[in-house]
Amino acid sequence: MNTKKKQKLVVVGNGMVGHQFIEYLLASDNADDYEITTFSNEPRLAYDRVHLSSYFSGSTAADLALTEQEYYRNKGVNFILDDKVVDINKSEKWITTQSGHLQSYDKLVLATGSYPFVPPVPGNDQEHCHEYRTIEDLEKIKASGAQSKVGVVLGGGLLGLEAAYAIKGMGLATHVVEFAPKLMSVQLDDGGSKLLHDKIERLGVNVHTQKSTLEISDGEHCRYRLNFTDGSHLETDMIIFSAGIRPHDDLAKKCGINLGPRGGIAIDDRCKTSEENIYAIGECAAWEGRIFGLVAPGYQMAKVAASQITGGQAKFKGSDMSTKLKLLGVDVASIGDSIARTPGAKTYSYSDVSGDIYKSLVVSEDEKTLLGAVLVGDVGDYENFLRIALNRDELPADPQIMIQPSTESEGTFEDDYADTDTICYCNDVCKLVITSAVKNGATTLDHIKTQTFASTGCGGCTDLVQQLLDAELNKLGAAVIKDVAQLSPDSMPELVEDLVD
């Protein structure tokens, strides 16, 4: 009988990263050494913020949920909902919540995430002006949408375009207003951004770039009027603010924990803060002054923190900010240094005759290394380009051929990836882990997700995981089975064995 006293581990924040940290800890060999308590200032446990817009197309809060209360109870995880942590007593090691709840800790993990930046313009706090961050925000947007004919999103980045997709799906005349000269200016070069702009406008969404909002006043034909600094204006019934995010670092600042030069809770390679027993992970954390606004880096930090706390030696060494997604029905991908910030970098680009596909490669000065890429309209090369960039594979003598249409056979799927190649970057899952899961009975994408965590983060690898699953099943001699939910996972090894025989 284990009589060892358990260490009290407190996780502040139960978003995607906070929950993933708990999953990593529960999966560790030393999980029984810890009593886990997590706090959420939302009225629910972790859910999938990456696919939040699906809430407008029929997905429910339950569909988006990443965990359930019963699961936490069965695993011995304590949770407190709808209660914000407002203070940390570092010397005595306990935290205080808004309701007055006190909780002691041995180790503390801050996973407080980020919040939407709302431009400080007069009129931004009116009834039908919303943020786009939580399920509660979406419920308010739905209510406003039912009383509106026109909607405006302030912000033409990733989240802004997701929000635009949501309100367009509600049947509103939709506008996107962006301060920068182009959409997704952080991820896309001029050619990629222009094509995205054109495609979105063809879908019926009006795009306004280089617009700075001066104030929000009463409208003549709609509820509100956005007055811009250039003298123009735009009327709307509803406004969604999606002009970027800011790290939730106020708790750390209040308690004297060091922040990064541009905000965020400063962490080292072990995800430790300036306090010995306090860690920070996800969008609230700043590593070498950088704040990572994607889920994959947050998951990597969660894995490092779980390792360090349980006696491991994992280190965080930064993270690739590549991403693949569908914005307003348009496939878009960005890899590495997509806008050629690297000194001496060269860019190759390709656009098809119809203008519906754009690809660009950013290569090193000696043209031997792929530094970044942009793909709009056709993202089929995303996984291959990402692998080449991360592995620093040497490029062909003429890199241009990589983005030109090819009629030559490109080999089989199995030829493209080595067993050690990473397939899911959010959860650091390599090809061998997935193929082993198939050999052990996984025959559907849901089985792969459950057994390996692959494709449970941003979802960018979902198509690749499905292809790998199909290829491995075919290799085993099994028919590709995409929906066998009626079969028990326990029966899968026997099924695969029978099919092989």
Image: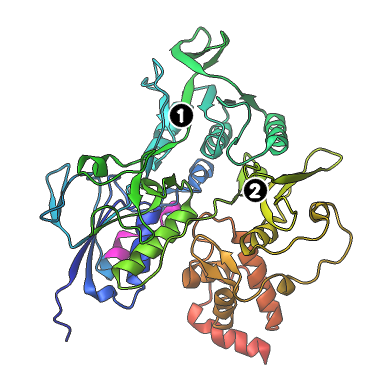
Quadrant containing the N terminus in the rendered view: bottom left
Dot 2 crowding, Cα within 10 Å, few <14, some 14–19, many 20+? many
Q: Residue furthest right?
A: 407
Query: Mark 2 = which residue?
Result: 333
The residue sitting at 67% across, 88% down in the picture is 500
The residue sitting at 47% across, 52% down in the picture is 295
In the rendered structure, which amino acid carries the disc numbered 1?
Answer: Phe
Query: Mark 1 = which residue?
Result: 241
- Between 486 and 88, the residue placed more toward the observer is 88
Is residue 383 positioned above or below 127 on the image? below
Q: Is residue 359 visible?
A: no
> At which x and y percent is residue 351?
81, 42
In the rendered structure, which amino acid carries the disc numbered 2?
Answer: Ala
Q: Which contiguous range is marked in magenta?
A: 64-72
Tell me the CA gap for discs 2 and 1: 23 Å
Colour setting: rainbow
> At which x and y percent is residue 106?
18, 63
Quadrant containing the C terminus in the rendered view: bottom right
Q: Secondary structure at mark 1?
A: strand
The residue sitting at 46% across, 59% down in the picture is 317
The residue sitting at 54% across, 54% down in the picture is 320
> At which x and y percent is residue 238?
47, 23
Q: Is residue 29 visible?
A: yes
Dot 1 crowding, Cα within 10 Å, few <14, some 14–19, many 20+? many
- Between 461 and 73, the residue placed more toward the observer is 461
Observer-side mark, 2 or 1, equals 2
> At which x and y percent is residue 55?
48, 44
Count of marks placed on residues: 2
